[in-house]
Image (tube, rainbow, N blue to C red):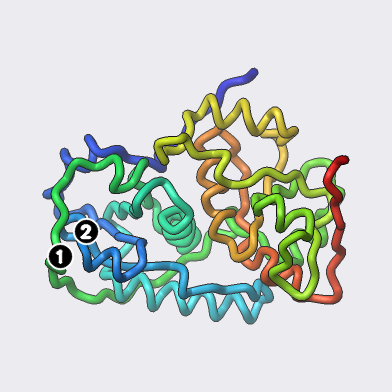
Amino acid sequence: MTQPDSTPTLLVDARWLEQHRGDSNVILIDTRPAKEYWEGHLAGARHFDPFPFHHKDTSDRGMEEFHGQLEWIFSALGITGRETVVFYENDSGMRAARGLWALQYAGHRNALMLDGGLKAASAKLTTDAEKFARTNFRIEPNPAVFASYAHIVDRIGSPDVQIFDVRSAGEYFSERIRARHGGAIPLAIHQDWTSAQSTEGHFKTPAELRANFESLGLDSGCEIIPYCQGGYRAAHAYVALKLAGYRNVRNYLGSWAEWGNRDDLPIEHPRRKP
């Protein structure tokens, strides 16, 4: 098995957090639901739950709206683009991964996740919310980390592109249908997104992730496009693939909420083996 060529810096641990707690250029973003945030969060953390901000339209017009949404969100969070931003939740989950991916897509160069989340941090929690100034964040979209439905349609069956379905098996096999149509994007390789997590809620090691992805047939020389229902679990897979050394990874933002609700896109209907 080949080892990851160069693992990007996407994760920080509890030790890093303790060492950089007082840094003025470090912003902590708590991505849990608001109720959990107000029950106790890391000192200085700002709150942003990405779940209410679904976006399933990856047309040109839809992406213009998404860009406006991101500018509004990151401005409200006081982000300028010059600081280090660390997203966290209770473990290494999809909420924090979505925040990381979205900020990377927006052109920010130093977006990170707290690996293991609050379960791994030994810091005392607070219910105080510190004041901070709103900014005027302007995005510089990074198309290399994003896939639209049109991008995928043009590349289905291409030998250098692989689609990675990270939904549950029930969704993949149309046992749980969450859109107008059940099924999957044709030729998609499937594995539930949680396979990238350890039992403790951390990401598995880069070597473990790489071995697993290679066993599925994911080729590091290909463009890999993960998708799920709304681009959240796919954002987690995006991070996991990057950690494993896969360099060309694009999150399909619209995912099945877009693909499965259209009548003009190809759909495959996988069946479980008897």
Query: Can residue 110 be spotted in the picture?
Result: no
Mark 2 vs 1, N-terminal side: 2
Q: Residue furthest top?
A: 1
Q: Is residue 180 left or right of residue 41?
A: right
Residue at the image position 83 percent from the left and 49 percent from the top: 187
Q: The C terminus is located in which quarter? A: top right
Q: The N terminus is located in which quarter? A: top right
Return the residue at label 1: 127
Task: Give whichever of 182, 29 is nearer the camera.
Answer: 182
Q: How many marks?
A: 2
Secondary structure state at the residue bearing disc 2? strand
Return the residue at label 2: 41
Q: Where is residue 220 shown, x and y percent of the image? A: 67, 34
Residue at the image position 85 percent from the left and 62 percent from the top: 267
Q: Where is residue 190 shown, x and y percent of the image? A: 72, 45
Residue at the image position 36 percent from the left and 61 percent from the top: 31
Task: Give whichever of 177, 207 is nearer the camera.
Answer: 177
Query: Can residue 224 be spotted in the picture?
Result: yes
Q: Where is residue 201 shown, x and y percent of the image? A: 42, 41
Q: Residues within 10 Å of mark 1 (few under 14, many from 20)?
A: some
- What's the amino acid at mark 1? Thr
Asked if marks 2 and 1 touch (Cβ < 8 Å), the reply is yes
Considering only vertical position in the picture, is 113 above or below 5? below
Tell me the CA gap for discs 2 and 1.
6 Å
Q: Is residue 23 left or right of residue 193?
A: left
